[in-house]
Amino acid sequence: MIRVAVVGAGQMAQRVYLPVLARREDVSLAVLAEPREDARRHVGRAYRFDRAVASADDIAEGEAECAFLLTRPADRRGPLGRLMELGLHVLSEKPMAADLAQAEQFVELARRRGRILMIGFNRRFMPAYRRAKEFLTGRRVETCRVWKQGGDLWGHAIHVLDVLRWFCGEAVEVQADGNLGPSGAETAVAALIRFDSGALGVFETSADFGMRKDELEAHGEGFSLRVYAPDKVIMYEGGREETYRHGKDAWYVEAERHFGFTEQIEHFLQAVRTGSKPTCSAEDALESHRLAARILERVRRRAG
């Protein structure tokens, strides 16, 4: 039985992580840390935590073996430091931190402590994207394009940037442009990225949209592929077409299954049990954060 701490009882905790953890027979929900008293009381009782406290600082030594850090990015520095001090392995929601400098500090902290720090890039576990990755294995991707509508780049569209890296390798050249709103936050971004594999990537995102979109398109010699997240992949090769579907068409209906959260949580817990390095380790995820920062820096520089 793995004793688990959960830090943060917001939407992601209640809609995705806690339902999955509560169904597992190998998990004991040891302690919930949540500063809002009403949420702490409600969630603590609903999921039968052994104890509910106001802060990660109140988690006792030996109370848990691993933790799920589900707070807002701006609120993660203190809790992560405390969890690492307690010697816990941690799965943190994305983005890893509020900015790149803080993300780099988190990676170094986990390295010094010798603890697992895994970042929740759940699309690497989403059945549709995993089927696409399987199809592309052994094939040379020439071009790959991703779209993500809704939310900012750092907090939301970084998901599909991570998929682009997963499929194409590491970025060696980046060109980008975009629009900034009155607050200075980006409202639309487009980037052209050259990867070390030779693939050319195109990334598009918009905070303003009328239709939610999370898609990928890849092409190479004799093949093409399209992913319509969360559940459909169309693969073309040699004049033949194959369609893969996973479950029903839905956004955050049965989200833990459609969006790979169940598999992501299992992968993290397996890494905790065995001491193995997880997919989406902090070191790997840091490269997606660095790519996002490079794109944003170019957008803001062009905007003056």
Image: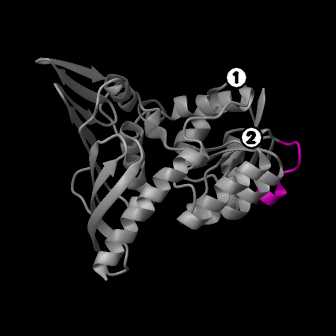
Q: Looking at this view, is 9 or 280 the one in front? A: 280
Picture coordinates of residue 230 (x, y %)? 34, 35
Disc tally is: 2
Label 2 or label 1, whichever lies nearer to me, is 2
Does label 2 or label 1 sit earlier along the sequence?
Answer: 1
Which residue is rendered at x = 39% and y = 70% of the image? 297
Disc 1 crowd rating (10 Å Cα; few below 14, some 14-19, many 20+) is: few
Picture coordinates of residue 184 (x, y %)? 37, 78
Which residue is rendered at x = 42% and y = 59% of the image? 292
Quick check: can you spot residue 118? yes
User: Mark 1: which secondary structure?
Assistant: loop
Quick check: can you spot residue 33? no
Which quadrant is home to the N terminus? top right
Residue 105 appears left or right of 231: right
**From which residue to which does the magenta span run?**
52-63
Q: How is the image coloured?
A: one colour
Q: Is residue 280 above or below residue 300?
A: above
Picture coordinates of residue 34 (x, y %)? 70, 57
Q: Quadrant of residue 165 in the image?
A: top left
Picture coordinates of residue 56 (x, y %)? 76, 56
| Residue identified by numbered label 1 | 25
Disc assigned to residue 66: 2
Type of residue at label 2? Cys
Q: Quadrant of residue 143 in the image?
A: top left
Which quadrant is home to the C terminus? bottom left
Residue 33 appears left or right of 167: right
Q: Quadrant of residue 64 in the image?
A: top right
The answer to whether mark 2 and mark 1 are in CB contact below 8 A is: no
Type of residue at label 1? Glu
Q: Looking at this view, is 170 or 144 the one in front? A: 170
